[in-house]
Each structure stands twice: as C-alpha cells, then as structure tokens.
Amino acid sequence: MKKSCVMAVVLAGFVAIAVAQDYPVKPVRVVVAAAPGGGTDFVARVMNVQLNERFGQPVVIDNRGGAGGTVGTDIVAKALPDGYTILMVFVNFAIQPSLYAKLPYDSARDFSPLSTLATTPLVLVVQPQFAAKSVRELIALAKAPGSRLNYAAPGVGSLGHLAGELFKNMTGAEMVHIAYKGGGPAIAAVMAGEVQAYFSTMPAALTQVKAGRLRALGVTSLARVAT
C-alpha cells in the first residue's frame, strides 16, 4: 500500500497577474479547504510566513473545511478572479470529480494551478493507551469477533478515508469510518479516544507522536521515515 498526500496551491479563474508588476497592492486571502490543525493547514501556515515577507502585504489564512474540501473550493471558485483569492488544496481536489455526481464548480475550468507545495506519506496513529502496539496487533483486534473499532478521516473521499478502506480490503480488518471536518479534528478525536485509528498526514501527527499523545504504528511509504 503506497499512499501519499499532495498539497498544492491553485488560483481562482484564469487571470494574468504577471501583467501587474506591482502585485500585490492589497491583502491576499488564502482559503485552506480544511480545518485548522491538519497537514494542509500546517503547510499553508509555513507558506504564509514566506509570502508575508515577500509580498509586503498581509496574507490572511481562511480555513474553510467541510465536505471533503468542497466547501472551501466552492468559495474560491465564486471569488473575483483577480489573483487575491488563492486556494490551498490537498489530493481531494483531484478526487472530488470522481466522487460527486455534481459539483458546484468545474475543477479544470474554474482554477489555474500555481504550484505543488508538499508531499507526505500517511502515518497510521492510535491513542497511546490503545491495546494495539503494532499494525499486526491492530489487524488482529479489528478481526476479532464482536470488534467495534472506528477510524477517523477528514471527510468522505479524503485520502485518510480511502487509505482506511484500502487497509480494510487488504487485511480483512473491520473498522467503521467516522468523518470529521479536517485533519485537526480527526487527530483530536483519536487523542480523546472517540476513534481508535487514523491515517494522518505526517506534518499533522508528528508533533503529537513526539509528545507521546499519539502512537505511530506505521507509514504508507515503501521506505521507513527517518523522523
């Protein structure tokens, strides 16, 4: 199983900002199509520091999570295409057209891609007090008679959701998907014991793993991750 999460920046509409040599002349809004605390939000805030320094204008992060990223994406699709509303998306942006029969925007027509910012493997995390201390033990617990394990994901069709379902198909484990509005709420749910597992992006989970608030069982990359 090889799953990774891609964070990218896209721009509302097809605009020619290059013509305006003095861009930007006013604050820039970066809509993050995810809740605070997740991997996409983490990358957006790292980028935000650099943009504030380079632009000389305020760059405002606006978290609009929900519906697997479609809420924030729709806001930017309807924004004035003047280069001052930027969308920060993750892999769901490419998945949405295959999941929803009708979206309120056209992913190809209504946006111009600017840059791929980051890629990260997913990390399978559980609460430190959880009985499973390895992937093998998690699978055994999930396949046990009467098992009632849940796993979190930042919305239906998110990479965490697809990774969880692929994990179930590959192992025969039985776990119920519980959808949250973003990676931050999903991680909080695992730490609170509301759910047992979560395939998280690395940036979102690493701090909590190092602090002992989450236990990492494995990663979805083919090689081990040094951190």
Image: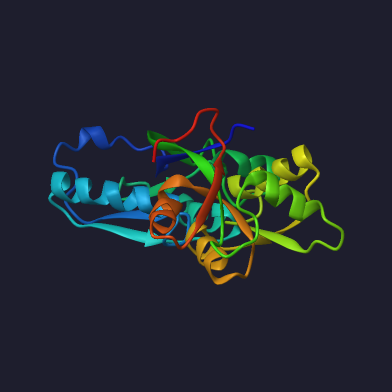
Residue in front for this viewpoint, 98 or 226 = 226
Name which quarter of the figure residue 119 lies in. Answer: top left
Rendered location of residue 101, percent (x, y): 72, 47
Rendered location of residue 40, percent (x, y): 43, 50
Q: Is residue 40 above or below residue 180?
A: above
Name which quarter of the figure residue 218 lies in. Answer: top right
Quadrant of the image for the N terminus? top right
Rendered location of residue 66, percent (x, y): 55, 61
Number of numbered callouts drawn? 0
Q: Is residue 31 left or right of residue 93?
A: left
Q: Is residue 168 left or right of residue 28?
A: right
Which residue is at 54% across, 43% downward? 93
Q: Is residue 175 above or below residue 185?
A: above
Q: How is the image coloured?
A: rainbow
Q: Is residue 61 left or right of residue 169?
A: left
Which residue is at 61% across, 62% downward? 130
Rendered location of residue 10, percent (x, y): 41, 41
Q: Is residue 79 visible?
A: no
